[in-house]
Amino acid sequence: MFKLQKKETIDQSSIYTVPLIAIGCSLIFVFILFLLIGKNPVLAIFIIFIEPLLSVFGLSELIVKATPLIIIALGLSIGFRAGVWNIGAEGQFTIGALFGGAAILAFYPTSGIWILPLSFFIAIIGGVLWGMIPAFFKARFNTNEILVSLMLTYVAILFLSGMVYGPLKNPDGFNFPESRLFHDSGTLPIIFPGTRAHIGFLIALLLAGLMYYLLKRHKFGFHVKVSGESSRALVFSGKSTNYMVYLSFIISGAFAGLAGVIEVSGPVGQLVPAIPVGYGFTAIIVAFLGRLNPLGICFAGLLLALTYIGGEAAQIRLGLPNAITGVFQGVLLFSLLAAEAFTNYEVSLKKMRGNF
């Protein structure tokens, strides 16, 4: 009988090699997939992964797509390090977008530099409140936070749709399910004129730097690490397990809510039912591909954003199906988990005992 056994010593170089192996395996898979569906694999890979980097427009769109992925993944990484599995970041992202967008619309058409910071604050509160629901059930009733947070995602999406079809619908929008366009005071400043790249990307980089400092140089990082390795050790360090559950969901909810309002006040510019596009789920891949390290998450976020932009271009140029981006991301996650398993564990042969 075969048995997976944790290795006594783990090569530290795996921190860098595992993501590279996962990316390589994913590229090989999509190469074969393109051959099977009759498409030129070299051209398809060039369009998806190289061409967007060769123009200012492509680079600006890369920044736009990467911003919410990086911010959400930074928040999720804290919980994953601590052994708290928040899978509902998509719902917290949606609630953040709804709360922040509603705050902007509440002051329409008033202008002022205070509107955008206020919407950020309200969006963060919304994300935190939504994240506190699974945290409460986990701490109070020991429920599975994966299921509760995931189910709340669909509640959040329906809540957004109900608000956009109802109280927040544009009265001059010919009954289309969308809100008013945000006033200039409710939209993010553009970094590069003529593009959609906004200061949200700079906020993401600042948050990455802050998280790196807290994890590496602050007592907070020690508590997170201890919680992930042993809940009993966390108690001996002076913190309870419920403390880390609440803290993980508060941080991840706040970051997801912030990402939501940045998305609607940036490239979208209004509230629409289609705001949740899967960033919260993709950010899980970003977090693990970045090895739960803030700097690694920045690079992983750019890579996954590249699949969105290149995937859309490949659909138009080569007639590829819409699912091609999701296929690559799914294979990337599978390859990452498989490489991680074989790095940390070894297969041993266990003798069967019994009476015959």
Image (cartoon, rainbow, N blue to C red):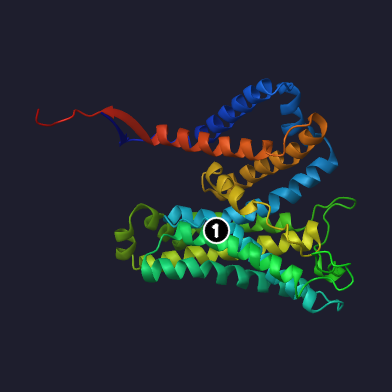
- Count of numbered badges drawn on the protein: 1
Image position, residue 340 (x, y; %): 45, 36
Image position, residue 158 (x, y; %): 65, 64
Q: Is residue 229 left or right of residue 208?
A: left
Residue 91, placed above or below residue 170:
above
Front residue of 73 and 282: 282
Q: Is residue 244 left or right of residue 201?
A: left
| Residue on which the image places disc 1 | 88
Front residue of 200 and 88: 88
Which corner quadrant of the image does residue 305 belong to?
top right
Q: Is residue 91 left or right of residue 218?
A: right
Please identify the residue farthest to the left as the structure is shown.
355
Residue shown at the point (63%, 61%) measured from the top left: 93
Residue shown at the point (81%, 62%) measured from the top left: 269
Circle 1 — which element? loop
Front residue of 182 and 40: 40
